[in-house]
Image (cartoon, coloured by chain):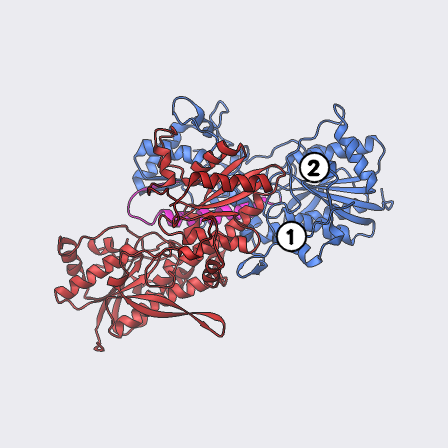
Chain colours: A red, B blue
Amino acid sequence: MNEKLIGSCIFGQSGGPTAVINASAYGVIKAALEAEEITKVYGAAHGIMGVLEDKLYVMDEEDPAELKLLLHTPSSELGSCRYKIADPEEDDTDYKRILEIFKKYNVRYFFYNGGNDSMDTCNKISRYMESVGYECRVMGVPKTIDNDLYGTDHCPGFASAAKYIATSCMEINKDARVYESGMITIVEIMGRHAGWLTASAALATEFGSGPDLIYLPECDFEMDKFLEDVDKLYKANGKVLVAVSEGIHYADGSFVSEAKTSATDGFGHAQLGGTASHLAEVVKNHTGAKVRGIELSLLQRCGAHLASATDINEAFGAGQEAVRQAVSGVSGQMVAFKRETVDGKYVCKMELLPLSAVANYEKKVPMEWINAEHNGLKHELIDYVLPLIQGEPELPLENSLPRYARLKKVLAK
Amino acid sequence: MNEKLIGSCIFGQSGGPTAVINASAYGVIKAALEAEEITKVYGAAHGIMGVLEDKLYVMDEEDPAELKLLLHTPSSELGSCRYKIADPEEDDTDYKRILEIFKKYNVRYFFYNGGNDSMDTCNKISRYMESVGYECRVMGVPKTIDNDLYGTDHCPGFASAAKYIATSCMEINKDARVYESGMITIVEIMGRHAGWLTASAALATEFGSGPDLIYLPECDFEMDKFLEDVDKLYKANGKVLVAVSEGIHYADGSFVSEAKTSATDGFGHAQLGGTASHLAEVVKNHTGAKVRGIELSLLQRCGAHLASATDINEAFGAGQEAVRQAVSGVSGQMVAFKRETVDGKYVCKMELLPLSAVANYEKKVPMEWINAEHNGLKHELIDYVLPLIQGEPELPLENSLPRYARLKKVLAK
């Protein structure tokens, strides 16, 4: 496993963007540019699509100072995709094409940064290259605001989104309590199946100004119980702040937001407006109170100005580690995080997990961390998230506005 | 006018909250606590309502360190109101009560922080006290994210919201361009009648990553022209980012968001979901593209974590100045800002405006600053807003989350 493998590398970004996915990109690109085994560093345009379409940017051509700005540039700077690759046993068309491109550019290293589906893509490419005897080391770099990747303590991207959510909930809570008159505010937070992000709103409450009620997709949602919860607090305090996951669902599995399409409530416009606006309508009819629905929408995943320095460092480190491991002979693995406590302090160690063990599993908020009423979180959740959001990066600014990386994106020929 | 007037003061906050209204509060409270003429400093709970209800907090009882945190605490910490006071000539009930409270606490100074309506309240109280011969100096401190106060170059609160909007639009723009597939994103920004905030989204475009199209309430909205604009850019680039003011309206004056209540489009639910979601629906039907509507909602006015240091300093300064002027004998005036350029640099000078000249007028974005197509801004707007958003305050944090002021709010008896 220790022989020197000389060749170029491709790096790709996949799935939904985050505030720090480009920090991982910088980790991979910087380490790859520095590795003597790696002759050329390509960035794939729109993930695996860029490989299939022979659209690769030459990272060696970029100004190092601009590359460094990737640490604070949100979203996927090389472009992303949601392309689901076939099983190589069923249809190997894509794999033949990937092999062709790999051969064309003498690609011996492939780094892919993404969530569950991306690790699956990564795993399939790894297996295929092995099966056809093409030597190429394939490494996964984790990423997802949803924090639902199996086998790693947490995922790069999650903490920055959590920090954005907690801070925004603190601010909203201040704003929503300003008048004497009653007010119910419902904040919708991302997470279809795992409630990590919505749960992080509990940090705002912990530090004095946050949601009174929090509903996660880990528990079946009961509308009657929800209305009862809200009503009770509204009658007691006149102000209620509720955080709900976009993925809350009834016991039969149907999403609460889907109710909008049913004939009974007469909306007929399911696609636009989500869970918060639907619940706001129901709560308004039930309580007669003034109700406001707020969707944090894309803002929560691209809020680089509120990124956690810990998250940026770890995302960068994961990218670097993937390159280090690959040049030392490792393949078919994802870089994962292991939490340790040293002298009472949080420490994040890196380890490796086989791609096959990660792909297509989902990690959810443990039921033991959710309160008995299913409308709040216990202290275990705070203890888990708090170390991850620590630290404020020194943001590159120009005219007091973010200065993002400006890459040349010179296409490889 | 230079005689020493000894007595207590009341300070109140009114209208919609901002990221820096508490900075003005701190300016007033600090200066009043320091002024030897002012014997006691009261903060009215929920603005003029707190005076009418005899609900006054004793600011002298507060910990100075906590008061200082008001500089970075969003929303109106003492509570706000939207109470419209009657004309004293028509109904003087409220004024008699205010006089009673003023006499009870020997109030000789009244400072009121708010927008148009609040300056009107301030003006009426000033005139009434004069008419009954009760000596009390009344001063207005400007505040409004809408920036529509007449006679002042700009208003405290506007710049921080503008900075939040510009930064968020830069981030959204990065996120919304990440996939190869087409995408149209519509961002809704506050401002019913004046488009200052929506116009500020142009800063994002100026610095490389912002809206392609911007629509203000200063121009009549034409749906056909709008769809044509969007369509053209969508066909050319595949991605379009649009910023619209919540107050855009047709030539007949009806708000675009109101269309949702009309029988023809069959929504029937006007109250929830606004302009962005309505336009997203129309654009989707027209183009067949994937369209996302995003409402910046309360977030834009309470985003203290992105506040402009210039705005904080000016808000604080305006509060201080109101006290300084009042103790020196001035009454019936609002502190206003005058922009000067010294050595090529922006300088904000303070001046005084009679309350009667400010109340109930609205300042809009000049038509000459809007492009001929009515879908973007000219450089004059950038030059106007840019100096106002400069500077990042050192935010007080605890566990990497905002540490807001925690006041005791001891009630006066």
Tell me where residue B328 appears, x and y as whole percent. 81, 46
Label 2 marks which chain's residue? Answer: B
Q: Does the magenta stretch include residue B176?
A: yes
The residue under label 1 is which amino acid type? Leu
Q: Is residue A304 left or right of residue B123?
A: left
**SS at circle 2:** helix
Q: Nearer the viewer, mark 1 or mark 2?
A: 2
Q: In which quarter of the image is the C terminus of chain A?
A: bottom left
Q: Can residue A303 be seen in this view?
A: no
> Looking at the magenta stretch, what is its main secondary structure?
helix
Instruction: Tell me what residue is drawn at x 83 percent, y 49 percent.
Output: B37
- The residue at which mark 2 appears reads as B49
Tell me where residue A63 appears, x and y as whole percent. 36, 63
The residue under label 2 is which amino acid type? Met
- In this picture, is A17 found above or below B93? below
Q: State the image quarter where residue A388 is shown.
A: bottom left
Q: Which segment is the magenta one?
A: B156-185
Label 1 marks which chain's residue? Answer: B
Tell me where residue B44 appears, x and y as whole percent. 71, 43
Tell me where residue B359 appears, x and y as whole percent. 68, 33
Q: Is residue B388 magenta?
A: no
Q: Residue B70 carries which label?
A: 1
- In this picture, is A394 found above or below B247? below
**SS at circle 1:** helix
Which residue is most to the bottom? A2
- In this picture, is A411 found above or below A269? below
Q: State the image quarter where residue A25 is shown.
A: bottom left
